[in-house]
Image (spheres, helix red, strand yellow):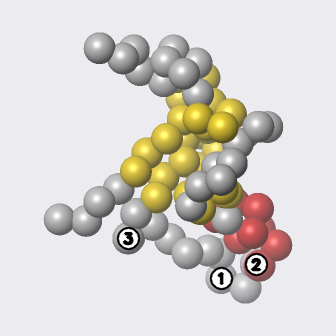
Amino acid sequence: MPTFSVSIVDPDTKKLLDELQVGEVWVQGPSVAIGYWRRPEYTEEMFRAQLAGENSLLRTVRCQRTPERT
């Protein structure tokens, strides 16, 4: 089964957020889209997001609050 990673990220600092904070939903996995057809600038902005020092993720630009850690 494919492995996916979902992260809640601060869009300004590009760092993972702690629990109960609001940020963008970023997704990484084998079936995530690779970009927009003939729109390289938009693709770069939306699909090449990268956590500080990490692999690239898809930026969904949807806000979500991080869950409580148990």
- Secondary structure of residue under mark 3: loop
x and y percentages locating residue 11 in the rendered image: 72, 39
Which image quarter holds the N terminus? bottom left
- Secondary structure of residue under mark 1: loop
Residue holding disc 2: 39
Label 3: how many Cα within 10 Å (few below 14, some 14–19, many 20+): few
| Residue for point 64% across, 44% down | 61
What is the tally of numbered marks visible in this picture? 3
* Amino acid type, label 1: Trp
| Residue for point 48% across, 24% down | 66
Check contact, mark 3 vs mark 2: CB within 8 A: no
Check contact, mark 1 vs mark 2: CB within 8 A: yes
x and y percentages locating residue 19 in the rendered image: 49, 18
Q: Is residue 35 visible?
A: yes
Tell me the number on the disc at residue 30.
3
Task: Indicate the quadrant where residue 10 lies.
Answer: top right
Q: Residue furthest left?
A: 1
Label 1: how many Cα within 10 Å (few below 14, some 14–19, many 20+): few
Task: Indicate the quadrant where residue 23 lies.
Answer: top right
User: Residue 10, relative to residue 30: is it above or below?
Assistant: above
* Amino acid type, label 2: Arg
Tell me the number on the disc at residue 37.
1
* Amino acid type, label 3: Pro
Specify which label sits upstream in the sequence, 1 or 3. 3
User: Residue 28, relative to residue 34: is it above or below?
Assistant: above
**Left or right side of 26 for 48:** right
